[in-house]
Image (spheres, rainbow, N blue to C red):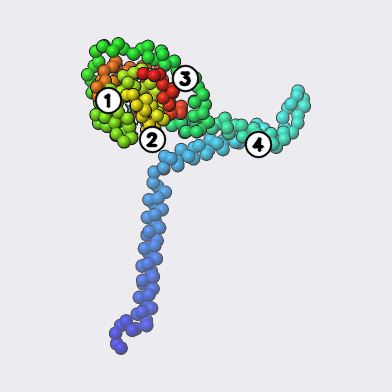
Amino acid sequence: MSSSSDNPLLRFAAFWWALGVFMLFGVILLVLKFTSGSAGKADPLEEAAAARRYEIRQTVTAAQEAALGYKEVEKGKVVQVRPQDVFELVGQELLAAKPVAVAKPEQIIPGSPRQLAVANEPVVDVAAVDALTPAADAAIDPALIEAGKAQYMAGTCFACHGPNGEGGPVGPTLTESEWVSGPVSNLIRIQLRGLQGPIQLKGATYTPLAPMAPLAHQTDEQIAAVLTFIRNSFGNKASAVLPEQVKMLRSEVGKPMLTEAELIKP
Ligand code: HEC
């Protein structure tokens, strides 16, 4: 009965003390939040977005100012501009101000208008590409073969065609393949556009489980090196492939996957 916790006055005081301490914590937290938050560095993405919004706002304002109100249609004849013309003008200005479409060819979206436009572009002169092919017996820099071997692994060819070009469940063999030692333009175009559907390979019809996807992210040098490597490995013996030849065919990127009918018979 004499315990201090039973004292109503003490309990009352303790309650207010606790409430005071609790509020004090809250105030400290708030102060911390506001001092650290607002003084923090600006987010570059937010800044860029804000700058873009500001630019668009200015474009709209300028377009509205140009169109709103009255316009002199003939010398001395001023007419009021129709509201729908204002909207149209603003729309045109916005379309013209749109940032340019993504220009990287490997980012062309399948089925997009850009891809359809690319698909209708004329085929590059493959004969001109093949005409540059060095003589079959010309010496090849061993460093180029080494680079090609590295690219064969890095470019994931080995995953489908096997570490020794022996082929596997998802890729045909590259050993003594008439395609590998055949026209260089075929090989480059397969790298840039991929290949789908059955092909005649070593006297039999090979029907792939899944097509070979385009590997156009590789540089001209990497494609030239990996093709030079496969043309001089796995029982194949053929000329080197030049980066210039790959470059000449870059406009193939983005077109639909090739079929055997679009290649030169090796
Ligand atoms: C995802 C699996 C895959 C990867 C990765 C791949 N290929 Fe292919 N490749 C295929 C398939 C499947 C075919 C056959 C496609 C067809 O017949 O329609 C093929 C066909 C070929 C052919 C012609 C046929 C032959 O066997 O001679 C060559 C040459 C070739 N690939 C080279 C390469 C090179 C070089 C790389 C790496 C830069 C590579 N491939 C990466 C799956 C792949």
Residue 81 spot, x, y in % from top left: 72, 33
Q: CA distance from mark 1 to mark 3?
A: 29 Å
Residue 9 seen in the current view: yes
Give the side of residue 64 with respect to residue 110, left or right.
Answer: right
The tag on residue 87 is 4
Amino acid type, label 3: Val
**Percent coordinates x, y for residue 216 in the rendering:** 38, 28
Which residue is depicted at the point 65% across and 34% down? 88
Is tag 1's residue or tag 3's residue first in the polypeptide sequence?
3
| Distance from the alpha carbon under mark 1 to that under mark 4 | 65 Å
**Most distant residue in the bottom direction:** 1
Confirm or deny contact between disc 1 and disc 2 (CB under 8 A): no
Q: Earlier in the sequence, mark 3 or mark 4?
A: 4
Q: Does label 1 or label 4 sit earlier along the sequence? A: 4
- Label 3, secondary structure: give it: loop
Residue drawn at x 49%, y 26% is: 119
Q: Residues within 10 Å of mark 2 (few under 14, many from 20)?
A: few
Q: Quadrant of residue 163?
A: top left
Mark closer to the observer (1, 4) = 1
Q: Is residue 36 above or below residue 79?
A: below
